[in-house]
Image (cartoon, rainbow, N blue to C red):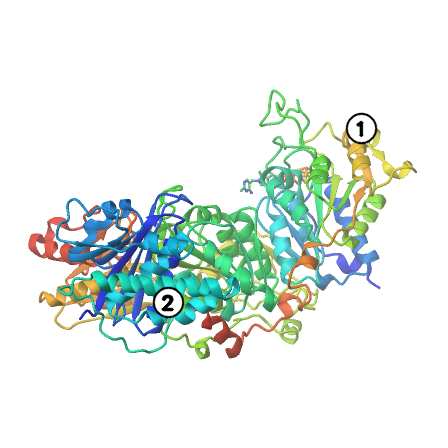
Amino acid sequence: MATVKDFRTSVKPNWCPGCGDFSVLAALQRAAANLDLDPSQMAIVSGIGCSGRISGYLKAYGFHGVHGRALLAAQGIKMANRDLTVIAAGGDGDGFAIGTNHTIHAMRRNIDITYIVMDNQVYGLTKGQTSPRSTQGFKTKSTPDGSLEREISPLQLALASGVTFLAQGFSGSTKELTKLIEAGIQHKGFSMINVFSPCVTYNKINTYDWFKENIVSLEDDPDYDPSSREMAMQKVMSTNELCTSIIYQEQRPSYTELLPNANHKPIVKQELELGEERFQELVAEFA
Amino acid sequence: MLHQLSWMVGGQQGEGIDPTGSILSKALNRQGYFIYGYRHFSSRIKGGHSNYKVRISTKPRLSNADALDMLVAFDQETIDLNARELKPGGLILGDSKFKPSVDRNDVQLLHIPLTEIAEELGSRIMKNMVAIGATTAILGIDPSIFTDMIKKQFARKGDKIVQANLEAIRKGAESAKEQLNPKTDFTLAPADGKSRLLMMGNDAISLGAMAAGCRVMPAYPITPASDIMESLVKRLPEIGGVVLQTEDEIAAVITAIGASYAGARAMTATSGPGLSLMMEAIGLSGMTETPLVIVDTQRGGPSTGLPTKNEQSDLNTVLYGSHGEIPRIVLAPSTAEECFYDTVHAFNYAEQYQCPVILMTDLALSLALQTVEQLDYSQVKISRGKLLSDEEVAALTDENGYFPRYADSPDGISPRAMPGQKGGIHYVTGVEHNEIGRPLEGTANREKMMKKRMRKLENVQLPNSLITREKDDAEWLIVGFGSTRGPIEEAREQLAADGIPTSHLHIRVLAPFPTQSVKDVLSRYERVLVVENNATGQLAAQLRQYVGDISTIYSQTKFNGDPYYPSEITEHVKELMAHGNSQRLSYVR
Ligand SMILES: Cc1ncc(C[n+]2csc(CCOP(=O)(O)OP(=O)(O)O)c2C)c(N)n1
Ligand code: SF4
């Protein structure tokens, strides 16, 4: 049985004390242990940002790439070796600014990876500029008079893009978050977990206290049915995107299950040599 | 009797120009003729003039001819636009309603009722068969060479269609024979009958990728690279691979990096605009030391430039693009055959040196059909470099359970583990890092890791980096890369016939630049002419940078979208000989 220790490293994260990302890391480690995963069968890919550092803080294969592109490397890894548990993680800037395009396409592709967004509604690593998740009017270094743009709605975006597992968590509730991550990893298909992960340094509005006051957990609603996309959309809109828990889940074949190669061995376990005979067959087309 | 002949079919795009050219090419290739087929097309899908040139020869040819012998016209526009390319005494084949070219009374128009015969047999489409029949009759070749091909190609459509097409060929041949003025002789000398292959550079790259064990190919469509993806999607899935059309080129290249990091052989293919988008990722591959193969099929730039025309202007981009400094390998095959072998090399180098490898072609090489000698599968050796077995990985794991992915080593190349391997856990990051992949900004570590990465290619000269044809009595050395090979070879024949012996250096590996070997060759010549399809002389600049001024380096450039005609090079050399140094270092011809 795996334990949390198996997923811990001796490296001290360089996050500010109190940063929400600590809880995301802890929840992910706990979830991996609860699911009895093998660290060497797990790959975590992250983007660039404070949040992006997470791939170096978990004991598992870690890939820290370029800004906004975590989902891409993650998908490449999954295609090459579908036996691996693949996690992608990054900030809201990473996923909903520079990488929005890839976020949408990974969802419609329904490839079996779990995507965790550490949503602090600001840019942390570049020291406090506006993010597409910052609320309209939010004042930052790059929007001194308040942001003029409306904030992006990750949950509506996900529902509209065909996501098959959608959850939202909060760094202030590590227990719930752990359960959400577990469910996300177990889900066969693309799972997105948006996590309110406060930036204690640059976001003085959306703080832990602010979230505690404003979020509603769907766990408290016995009538909520996460298999209904309509209900999910309604709930997301009526709570102004501030609901937590599993918001939507649907079973649909994942991308790797639909691939014509699904009945072959995972790519990295295949023989590379084509063989003279097969080669001659290919060449015959050009004779 | 002719040993070579240049033929063209032209008409509106979408009228069956391509199949006409390729059916003729394929049948003649099977007879042992050497073919070079070049498509001239525009970005419009239907409509707009397009044409297909086929060079038929009893010896290898990799270039369009200076002039045409025969032109098959599907419309009047084809005559008006292209008759000027015909040799005196050349032949035009076309419907009886077509008028001869106004300014060419030295060429003959044979009225072959292409459309009429085709319509009588049931469909206008078949006029290409009529044209092929007429063509072969004029060449003195028995049109029965098409029978097997036609039977196979139309088998699914039923016997009636097969018979109609065969009849179209026969009637075309008959009509041509009836009218051909016996004074003109277009009879082709017999070929050697040897069986060879006929393919485009892009086909050879797809075959090379299959043979090299490529199993993941993410790409975004772009001319002239798309058919690499399209041909792989037909073949990779059945052997367990994946081809996916991504949302853009950034996605394509980073998905390939992910797959490669996970241990698969992965490749993407693109052209200039896509390559520009991939630049950040090329740096990532270099910094994380993740193997990566990118094919860049150059076309006319900048921006969307000339999307369907030939150019070689990405050289600087592939050599210097991406921020910061990384080791990289750039291969530039010059024939379809080399495209095949170099694609195999590209995958090996990517893993052996753990860096990005760019295989660079150009539109003329990627899309021209050419005769290729049988490919030798026994030469395909897969070498995965320092990718370790589970046992080897376990032996290197440290007491904390980490694998030193970036361990320093004399050759700069570190052992590699892939996710899923027990004991291989490590961190990969585009941030400067230490030996186990932990971010580390310190100056000493920075220097050490920079040196480690750069060392892997510092003293490497890759095999087959040059192709040389040297003549003892040559004063001139002509240098090129990629598809200029054919025109240069032919220009040398023309010059030799005029008593001017020349030598030829074609550079097949552009990075790491084979400095010493190039220097050795250049030191034997006083005059060097660098021939390339771009405006600023990018290859010439490379030579000047690496070999300095041991020779006088002249530059010939062409950037109008067309490949070189051999005579353009011939004339340029003669001009330089007449006017000497006045043109030294001139950039624009
Ligand atoms: C192509 C590119 N553009 C810009 C940057 C600079 N950059 C680094 S992180 C970042 C934004 C980080 O914000 P977010 O993704 O929300 O992560 P956080 O730091 O808040 O966790 C930016 C703009 C970069 N590294 N690469
Ligand atoms: S700046 Fe904000 S997001 Fe970054 S580590 Fe500090 S608290 Fe966390």
CA gap between label 2 and label 1 equals 66 Å
- Position of residue A129 measured from the top left corner of the image (x, y, whole percent): 61, 31
Q: Residue furthest top?
A: A145
Q: Quadrant of residue A1?
A: bottom right
User: In the image, what residue type sits under mark 1?
Assistant: Ser
Q: Which residue is found at the position 66% from the left and 49% from the top? A: A109
Which residue is label 2 attached to?
B26
Q: Quadrant of residue B346?
A: bottom left
- Position of residue A83 measured from the top left corner of the image (x, y, whole percent): 71, 63
Note whether B428 is above or below B148 in the view shown: above
Q: Is mark 1 within 8 Å of ligand 1?
A: no
Give the side of residue B395 with respect to residue A285, left or right: right
- Position of residue B107 measured from the top left corner of the image (x, y, whole percent): 16, 54
Looking at the rendered image, the quarter that the C terminus of chain A falls into is: bottom left
Q: Which residue is found at the position 63% from the left and 22% from the top? A: A146
Which residue is label 1 attached to?
A238
Q: Quadrant of ligand 2?
A: top right
Answer yes or no: is residue A174 visible: yes
Chain label for disc 2: B
Q: Residue furthest right?
A: A222
Chain label for disc 1: A
